[in-house]
Amino acid sequence: MSPQLTGILLGGIMPAILLGILAICQKLSNQAGIATSWLIITAGIGVLIVGLCLYVIMPDRTISMKSALLAAGVGLCWGISMGLVGIALVKYGVPISKLVPLYNMNTLVAVVLSLLIFGEWQELNLSKLLVGSLLIIIGGSLAATA
């Protein structure tokens, strides 16, 4: 298997599966009677465990103040996002099957920002990207209104 294919499997396919399972676990946890705040706290414990395991098994332990602050932003964005999903599930009774297609349009936000911030537009076929983005919008909108 090529390094590119391995990277796509590890960084794309597996996270897609795990994030799909995440949504189901969140809904089940809410149905079992957890407050949104406790869901985020206990999920954070799970993230801490994964981080500690990676710290032990991965040799690179590089960190700087800038990288740590940006990483904290990752946690803040994730925590706020999952908290809002929890509120939508519990307080407003929105089905997870309608929320996931909408919040997974985060792909479009990441694509646009990566094009602007990292100049990745130079490496991509922009017409394919535009068509793919339109399909994401159409698919997410259709699934959310099903």
Image (cartoon, grey):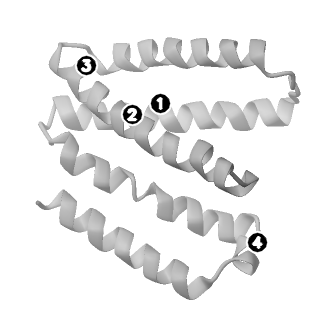
The earlier-in-sequence mark between 2 and 4 is 2
Q: In whole angstroms, how far apart are the C-alphas of marks 3 and 4?
A: 40 Å
Q: Is residue 82 left or right of residue 128?
A: left
Q: Looking at the image, which residue is at 50% across and 35% down?
A: 78
Locate residue 120 relative to residue 107 in the image: left or right. right
Question: Whole-percent x and y of residue 144?
Answer: 20, 58
Can you say whether 20 is above or below 56 in the image? Answer: below
Identify the residue shown where x is 68% and y is 51%: 1
Quadrant where the image shows the C terminus = bottom left
Q: Are marks 3 and 4 in contact (CB under 8 Å)?
A: no
Residue under label 2: 82
Question: Relative to 139, is 98 above or below?
Answer: above
**Closer to the camera: disc 1 or disc 3?**
3
Mark 3, residue position: 29
Residue at image x 88%, y 30%?
64
Q: Earlier in the sequence, mark 3 or mark 4?
A: 3
Q: Which residue is mark 1?
A: 79
Look at 63% across and 36% down and name the residue there: 73
Query: Where does residue 45 sit, x and y in percent of width and height?
Result: 51, 11
User: Up-down: is 107 above or below 120?
Assistant: above
| Among numbered discs 4 and 1, the one appearing first in the sequence | 1
Q: Position of residue 134 (x, y in %)?
A: 39, 78
Tag in front: 2 or 3: 3
Q: CA distance from mark 2 to mark 4?
A: 29 Å
Identity, as a three-letter code, of the amino acid under mark 1: Gly
SS assignment at label 1: helix
Name which residue type carries label 3: Ser
Residue assigned mark 4: 119
